[in-house]
Amino acid sequence: MFLRNNLAVAGTFFQKRESHKVTYRSGRHKSELDLLVVRKKQLWRVKDCKAIAGEFVTTQHKPVIFVIRLDKKRKPKIQGRKVIKWWKCKGQLLFDYADRVRDEFMRLNEVVGDLEDEWKKFKNAFVGTAEDLCGRSSGKGGQRKNQEWWTDEVALAVKEKRDLWKRIESLRLEGHEPSVSLKLAYSQKKNIARRVVQNACKRWSRSYITS
């Protein structure tokens, strides 16, 4: 039946001592009665298979553990928002923006319409002018990389934090509990990354205002 359906008994592919092979014991009688079966093409996923000595699920039957590799769930790629590049609006471009907005408001005083039309004209004076002068982001690279506060220092701090988090997640997927020192290191890197991002945003805000 196993050959016909391309199945394999997982426990037969690992070298174990007898106490980890026997799943049923009754007096002097013992047997590998409880089996875990997988398709042969999925056998590479099996990392371990053994009976737990000294433990019983029901009378005379030992529990059998089955450790497998799971595919990491991929997050769907989300299209970012196409935002106006307001951070470009400084220097001479800021003066041009102010002149264009002033001209738009002069036209608003000349044209009288209903409330909805007036609101659209008012919005276009600010948003439409900024879009013409500064443009919009593509939305593909995420908002962070389009911001001037996203410096090499910020990128490094965030990367170090993410690397430690990936190590913690990989250990948990393998059935191991991360060490206290690893958790503490991640917590420290997380706090450092938060401070670096906050300081970078503050510096960028001050430079934007003064420019």
Image (cartoon, grey):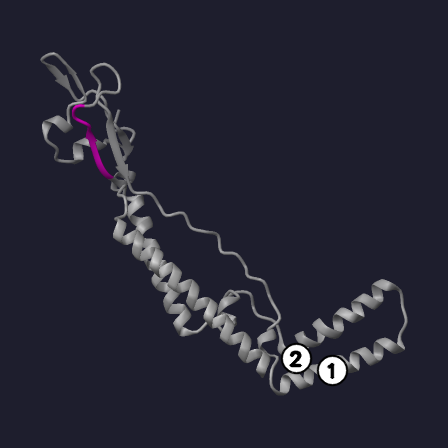
Note whether 118 is above or below 184 in the view shown: below
User: Can you see residue 39?
Assistant: yes
Note whether 130 is above or below 197 in the view shown: below
Predominant SS along the magenta part: strand
Residue at 17 percent of width and 22 percent of height: 32
Residue 209 vs residue 147, the one in the foreground: 209
- Horizontal side of 13 relative to 122 (left or right) equals left
Residue under label 1: 100
Task: Give the label, 2 or 1, closer to the camera.
Answer: 1
Residue at 68 percent of width and 85 percent of height: 96
Residue 43 vs residue 183, the one in the foreground: 183
Q: Position of residue 197 (x, y in %)?
A: 45, 67
Note whether 141 is above or below 125 in the view shown: above
Residue type at mark 2 is Leu
User: Can you see residue 40?
Assistant: no
In which quadrant of the rendered view does residue 34 lie?
A: top left
Q: Which residues are magenta?
A: 47-54
Q: Earlier in the sequence, mark 2 or mark 1?
A: 1
Residue at 84 percent of width and 68 percent of height: 118
Q: Residues within 10 Å of mark 2 (few under 14, many from 20)?
A: some
Q: Position of residue 51 (x, y in %)?
A: 19, 27
Q: Is residue 105 magenta?
A: no
Kindly state the secondary structure of the residue where label 2 is placed: helix
Kindly state the secondary structure of the residue where label 1 is placed: helix
Q: Are marks 2 and 1 in contact (CB under 8 Å)?
A: yes
